Image (cartoon, rainbow, N blue to C red):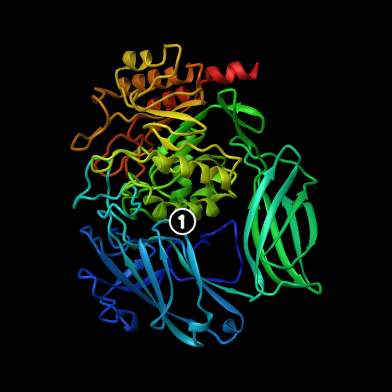
Amino acid sequence: MNIVPRPEHPRPRFYRASWENLNGLWEYAFDFSLSGREKKWNERTSLDGTIAVPFCPESTLSGIGFTDFIPAVWLLRRFTVSAEQLADAVLLHFGAVDYETEVFINGRLAGRHVGGYTPFSFDVTALLRAGENTVTVYARDDVRSGAQPAGKQSVSLASAGCYYTRTTGIWQTVWLEFVPRTRIAGLYVTPDARNGKLDFTVFLCGDADGCTLRVRALSGGAPAGEMLLKAGGAAVSGSLALEVVRLWSPESPALYDLELTLERSGAPLDRVESYFGLRSVEMRDGCLFLNGEPLFQRLVLDQGFYPDGVYTAPNDEAIRQDILLSKALGFNGARIHEKVFEERYLYWADRLGYLIWGEFPNWGLDISDPSGLAVFLPQWAEALRRDYGSPALIGWCPFNETWDYAGRRQDERVLAEVYRYTKTFDPLRPCIDTSGLYHVVTDIFDVHDYEQEVGKFASHYRGDGPYLTYPDRQTYRGEPYMVSEYGGARWEPKGGPGWGYGSDPRSEDEFAARYEALTHTLLQTDYCCGFCYTQLYDIEQERNGLYTYARERKFSQAVYDRIRKANTETAAIEKRLRR
């Protein structure tokens, strides 16, 4: 039996009922010599072994657990479609495949995609036949090339330092969608909390002339607004006034359901379900304001790795539990770090009330020359488009710690251009150009400070002006200021190898006291508007998490209580701005 792992719909903000999950047992073959294309493996009807998709071959959940370098992998699955399903259109979707992908249907090319973190799809109707079909995926991957974003994937044979097990090939859900030829193709929603309305653009495919688009919002199952618009062309835009105004926040994550129906002569052609949250985000007076109220960002670093699935959560509940673990400790959000997380993570952040900074896995890509923009921008654009509608997502950070590459400094023109591009796409959210090293143009000035000696750490924040970790590269121009990485002390109660920042605490009490002192310093620094603690859980050799890699407890409840109390202390900037 082909048991389906990760059976839930992978795209909650764009749901159709007519879909089929293709996760489960596939066949695979490694292509170490990169000769599979020449050998016409795309025409093969079977491959060497079996793999559980959507888990990468490096993971144990895939059934393989091969952690050496894999230059390329082929994956194959058989599936059936009916003549009725072929009467309209069939879309083949991939949540993410790392890195350069070619997809074949029955041996014929369906399409190509470059980028390991963002979704893509192909209309495969013309390549299918009624009955059995094969889908074959060819994925090439080279994290050592300097020419592809790879995040925290190790460029050495083994994991080392803050680099971990690699991911090759499919690592998010694959699914079919059976759609009408004239259909809803996409959606952008922009909440306007001040005016109690939703601005939207709905993209269309096919001949929509003479059609109408019905837009309906519901709050708690009750009608909250509806409108009917004439359709035609490539898109329909409008503003939906909301009869019930409920604001989204971490304390009260109110969401509206959204129904889109494309109609012709009163008969429905296509229907898509989505949701949205009504909230405003702005940076002013040195602080983030959510719905007009100052909000100190109490964030934790989450790198999105799992001991059995590597990049892929073993199940949907594991994603939800990570957020609940964090909220239980008094954090109100996370930097989802050096990775574009699964859409289900943002779904649970939206549902549970959890602030998110969207990052990109820029490590591995050489941007010491502007030519790196040709690689970066298309993939960053896909991430921006995918996650734009999430109410939990409050800011963008395209680059993290853009260190020199092969002795060459990162080109400041690249950082400035990506910042401008991001703000052009989304002028409503703040953008950090590059986190923790130096800033060219940014909405928030952030630093990484891993000093462990509490007195010395406190001295960094006693002066009149903000602390700069790299004063030779950093120029502060009065932007809102936050410490977006700190802490990271190693705590390994069972002993053994692994690392953290600075000297190890000698006891649980010393760990808790250090945590309290570091966090108190940032909360009571008048110009500091947020922090991000490193990190929520251990990852492989990195043992500086508040939980183990398996998300098990590392401390007594008394320590966790102290952490929560430290995190929830009222910040100086909140006191000042709430007067």
Q: Residue at x 33, y 83 (%)?
A: 43
The answer to whether any part of residue 358 appears in the image is no
Tell how many labels: 1
Relative to 124, say whether 249 is above or below.
above
- Answer with left or right where residue 459 lies relative to residue 33: right
Corner quadrant of residue 16: bottom right
Instruction: Name the quadrant of the C terminus.
Output: top right
Residue 311 pos. (x, y %): 36, 53
Residue 25 pos. (x, y %): 36, 72
- Kind of element beneath mark 1: helix
| Front residue (pair 323, 66) | 66
- Answer with left or right where residue 515 lies relative to residue 244: left
Residue 138 pos. (x, y %): 34, 71
Corner quadrant of residue 174: bottom left
Relative to 307, say whether 93 is above or below.
below
| Front residue (pair 385, 552) | 385
Amino acid type of the residue that numbered disc 1 sits on in the rendered structure? Pro
| Front residue (pair 448, 62) | 448
The answer to whether any part of residue 450 appears in the image is yes
Q: Which residue is mark 1?
A: 378
Instruction: Name the quadrant of the N terminus.
Output: bottom left
